[in-house]
Image (cartoon, rainbow, N blue to C red):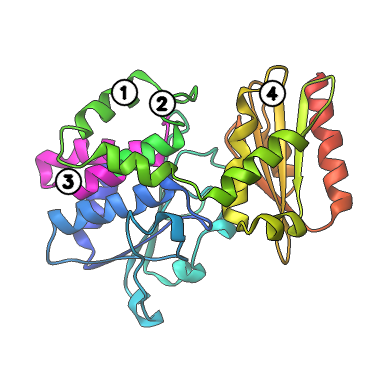
Amino acid sequence: MKNQILSTIKQAEKIIIHRHVRPDPDAMGSQCGLAEIIKASFPDKTVYVVGESEPSLEFLYLMDQIADKEFHDALVIVCDTANQERISDQRYKSGKSLIKIDHHPNEDAYGDLLWVDTSASSVSEMIYEFYLSGKDEGLVMTEKAAELIYAGIVGDTGRFLFPSTTNKTFKYASELIQYDFSRTSLYNELYKIRPNVAKLSGYVLENFSMSNSGAASMVLQTSVLEKFDVTVSEASQLVSVLGDIEGIKAWVFFVEEKDQIRVRFRSKGPVINQLAKKYNGGGHPLAAGASIHKWEEAEKVLEDLESLCQS
């Protein structure tokens, strides 16, 4: 499949790369790292990266603003996005052909070419593997691409702490850090938080709920976000705060937005992506997300999480 993707890229004159909404470091790292590799390898090709901006990740890369006409006869590649409804910039359908590169369970098998590897720690890891497989056929790695890919791996492995981290992950990371970029500066940017967010983190630790079964939850309504002057994205990133607490098996964050309630699941054992799928979401076995629209639905989510932790 990697060879087929490279062959398709070689044939394309214009390439537009997407990723999922509300991007995290892996979404940005894989999308923009791939873009940098293609640009360096094939300078005559036109390469764009599209999707809504995420201010906390703009230090990594800036998105392109392009007209609809650019999609005509373009090869479209979507990175790190399991479901079509989560693709940022729905114009992805307007291209000539479509490639999906992902590491989530392949519930929505879209695209003309699909490379899905659920054993990969991240799609950024897959992009580095793509480079390795094609470097003898013209693929070029740059310092910026290496930094982006490394950032994506670090982000999706929780700084190499998550179970998805493998020997291959460490091997690739060790090769990537041979390139000339500052890991210290990268870590500082990836993990810095505003004082307001730090205070909200304290609020979360004081106010989360946990049942005897090990199911835990945290509700962050708009009034709380306004009180701490924190964005929805910043609040959602605090889901990992509960990860070190003794007795918790799985937990959920409910973060209220204007038109929906963002639901973020994490687990230390119980598989939670099928639960996320029940509520129009999905993800990995131990990390997933969904969306609901009424607080009554949140009660049902909690009941289902409780049942999952009891089984």
State the separation of the CA atoms marked 3 and 4.
39 Å
Which of the two residues, 244 or 224, is positioned nearer the viewer here?
224
Please give the residue where the numbered disc 1 appears in the rendered image. 170
State the separation of the CA atoms marked 2 and 1.
8 Å
Which of the two residues, 276 or 246, is positioned nearer the viewer here?
246
Please give the residue where the numbered disc 2 appears in the rendered image. 160
Classify the position of the C terminus by image quarter: top right
Q: Main SS of the magenta segment?
A: helix
Q: Which residues are magenta?
A: 120-148
**Magenta stretch: includes residue 125:** yes
Tell me, for residue 270, which label it has, or none: 4
Please state the horizontal and vertical placement of residue 158, each as a whole percent of the image. Answer: 46, 31
State the separation of the CA atoms marked 1 and 3.
18 Å
Q: Residue at x 68, y 48 (%)?
A: 290
Q: Disc 2, disc 1: CB below 8 Å?
A: yes
Tell me, for residue 143, which label it has, or none: 3
For marks 1 and 3 on the same chain, the one whose residue lies earlier in the sequence: 3
For marks 2 and 4 on the same chain, the one whose residue lies earlier in the sequence: 2
